[in-house]
Image: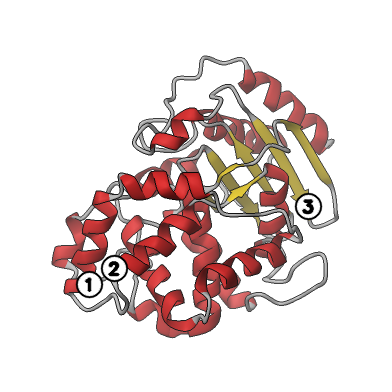
Amino acid sequence: MNIKEVIQNAYHKIKDIDDKGNLASYIPELENVNSACFGVHISTIDTLNFGVGNYHDKFSIQSIAKVLTLTMAYNILGEKLWKRVKVEPSGTAFNSLVQLEVENGIPRNPFINAGAIVIADVLLSNLDNPKEDFLNFVKTLSNSKEICYSEKIATSEKSVGYRNAALCNFIKSFGNIENKPSEVLDFYFNLCSLEMSCKELSNLFLFLANDGFTLADNEQILTRSQTKRINALMQTCGFYDESGEFAFKVGLPGKSGVGGGIIAVHPKQYAIAVWSPKLNEKGNSYKGMRFLEEFTTESKLSIF
């Protein structure tokens, strides 16, 4: 099977469909993105790198960054981390407050906003220079020095981040936030503003396809057991209340962001990144979801 050919065919098939999605209008700066952009890049364990479309263009990875903060926090705290955040699918929207009341401020998983805010708090408590240290960690993983926060997007998110502020303060009332909510939220808005290309993203996530080791220099980022658990969380929780649909149609661990990006991982084989800014009603890239379904169906390269 020719992977490049499968990707090209799937790309051209999905590129011309009627895009029924909408830009993430609740973050003003994300409305300025060219909605016609569509890029794909795959990185494999056997060093294939291949992209089509806008795979070199940088975009705001948004919630995809939550996998990276989780990785860093898991590295620091180990199994103690799960006392602060659970590992169950939420079944509710990514910014929901509903479950926190009955679950005493312990978020259902690290990928909903409440959970990611707790993870940001963990990093604030354990890093000397959180923004700089996290950015350097991401640059090391991706083997790229060109990755940066977007001040414009972080400021834009902060200007409308009332629900995230409510989440953070509500969790604080249960004692599950250690730092000042304003400092936690500032860090959270910045980490969500990270900008990468599909190529950088797929190269970065190869460590989750490689038993926790970077491909470039064989550095161990996570143990095999920890890597398994991060992949499991992406499989069950990576697409909020559409995670079951993604597992059903695509069959890969993955994570989406409201910037229109999706990263998906096939353990022992590859990481693939897709970017198309228009989102479906669940907040996931409309064309990105359709492309990955087409790709795994035609290539038969899913985990099921």
Nearer the observer: mark 3 or 2; the answer is: 2
**Residue on which disc 3 sits:** 44
Q: Nearer the viewer, residue 24 or 145?
A: 145
Kind of residue indicated by mark 3: Thr
In the rendered structure, the answer to whether residue 10 lies left or right of residue 22 reads: right
Task: Indicate the quadrant where residue 71 lies.
Answer: bottom right
- The mark nearer the N terminus, 3 or 2, is 3
What colour scheme governs how the chains and residues are painted in the rendered image of this protein?
A: secondary structure
Determine which of the numbered discs, if any, sits on residue 181 in the image. 2
Tell me the SS state at disc 3: strand
- The mark nearer the N terminus, 2 or 1, is 1
Residue with the most extreme left position: 102
In this picture, is 121 found above or below 46?
below
Quick check: marks 2 and 1 in contact, CB under 8 Å?
A: yes
Residue 2, position in %: x, y? 84, 35
**Residue on which disc 1 sits:** 172
Residue 100, position in %: x, y? 20, 63
Residue 252, position in %: x, y? 57, 49
Tell me the SS state at disc 2: helix
In the rendered structure, the answer to whether residue 214 lies left or right of residue 228 reads: right
In this picture, is 183 found above or below 275?
below
Residue at (67% x, 44% y) in the render: 197
Mark 1 surroundings: few (<14), some (14-19) or many (≥20) residues within 10 A: some
Nearer the observer: mark 2 or 1; the answer is: 2
Residue at (33% x, 77% y) in the render: 84
Task: Indicate the quadrant where residue 3 lies.
Answer: top right
C-alpha separation, residue under disc 3 versus residue under disc 2: 40 Å
